[in-house]
Image: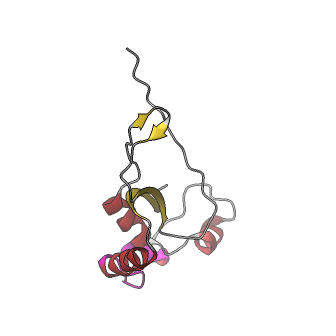
């Protein structure tokens, strides 16, 4: 999704706090982003209930989109003998940038045949 990211890093509590603080400095949620100025935007065509219904459910989340662009939304991890090949302290992380909310995550395996 355009407001989540996938990354590999160390899953350590203080590091997670540092990352949150760093990301908030890169893209502060309260910055006056144009994307968040809903009164300047049009609703998608044929939105049920019109512009008002669309605007009522549309989050002000430009910072989430920007951070997702920077962090990326995919990773490639080798699998050897059925296990992810990660370093000792590495974890694959889904980074929620606009939540919490229910998400669906896709995983694609590419198998090399010899």
Q: Is residue 33 visible?
A: no
Image coordinates for residue 98, horizontal then vertical, percent: 51, 70
Q: Is residue 56 left or right of residue 78?
A: right
Image coordinates for residue 29, horizontal then vertical, percent: 42, 81
| Residue at horizontal 56 percent and vertical 55 percent from the top | 45
Between 71 and 50, the residue placed more toward the observer is 71
Q: How many numbered dots are placed on residues in this image? A: 0
Quarter of the figure with residue 52: bottom right
Considering the whole magenta stretch, tell me its main secondary structure: loop
State whether residue 63 is above or below residue 87: below
Q: Is residue 65 left or right of residue 57?
A: left
| Residue at horizontal 37 percent and vertical 74 percent from the top | 19
Residue at far top of view: 114
Q: Reply yes or no: does residue 33 show up in magenta.
A: yes
Range covered by the magenta-colored residues: 26-38
Image coordinates for residue 76, horizontal then vertical, percent: 37, 42
| Residue at horizontal 44 percent and vertical 75 percent from the top | 36
């Amino acid at each position: 999704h355009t407001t989540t990211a996938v990354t590999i890093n160390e899953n350590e509590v203080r590091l997670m706090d540092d990352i949150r603080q760093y990301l908030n400095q890169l893209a502060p949620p309260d910055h006056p982003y144009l994307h968040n100025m809903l009164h300047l935007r049009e609703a998608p065509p044929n939105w049920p209930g019109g512009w008002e219904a669309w605007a009522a459910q549309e989050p002000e989340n430009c910072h989430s989109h920007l951070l997702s662009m920077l962090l990326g939304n995919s990773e490639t991890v080798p699998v050897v003998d059925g296990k992810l090949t990660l370093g000792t302290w590495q974890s694959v992380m889904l980074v929620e940038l606009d939540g919490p909310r229910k998400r669906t995550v896709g995983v694609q395996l590419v198998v090399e045949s010899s």
